[in-house]
Amino acid sequence: MNTPKELRYSEEHEWVKVEDNTVRIGITDFAQSELGDIVFVELPEVGDEISADEPFGSVESVKTVSELYAPISGKVVAINEDLSDSPEFVNESPYEKAWMVVVEPSDASEVEKLMTAEQYVEMTKED
């Protein structure tokens, strides 16, 4: 399982990458492997506000539909439009091609509350 050390992780299996004044969000390699082949991704609109621990979209696999939970609160400033035509990117490249949204955080300190890569790996061992 690929768990990049420079990212932060939520208990709901989202990853967060801090980039200057914004945060890029996607789902983890662990999550995509548990879900199976992703066939559809539903994302919020640019300009939408998302709230930590609240659903902001969903991914549909051949097995199930799973909600995406916001790891932090903020305003959506970009969405990955490639995922509407190529949802398989979530399986192929969860950390590069399959980022989901870029958010301008309302409270940047929320990132510090997320798990490190080591903590996330430890948590997923227990599942």
Image (spheres, helix red, strand yellow):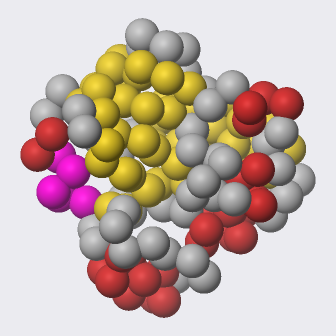
| The magenta segment | 110-114
Quadrant including the N terminus: bottom right
- Left or right, residue 88 beside residue 2: right
Residue 111 covered by magenta stretch: yes
Q: Is residue 87 above or below residue 29?
A: above
Q: Nearer the viewer, residue 61 or 46?
A: 46
| Residue 114 makes an appearance in the image | yes
- Left or right, residue 14 beside residue 75: right
Q: Which residue occupies the extreme top position in the image?
A: 47
Total numbered badges shown on the rendered structure: 0
Q: Nearer the viewer, residue 88 or 31?
A: 88
Q: Where residue 17 sits: x, y (%)?
A: 37, 51
- Quadrant housing residue 103: top left
Q: Where residue 82 sits: x, y (%)?
A: 74, 32
| Residue 51 makes an appearance in the image | no
Q: Where residue 3 sits: x, y (%)?
A: 49, 75
At 32% from the left and 43% from the top, the residue drawn is 19
At 37% from the left and 74% from the top, the residue drawn is 5
At 53% from the left and 48% from the top, the residue drawn is 26
Q: Where residue 58 sits: x, y (%)?
A: 63, 37
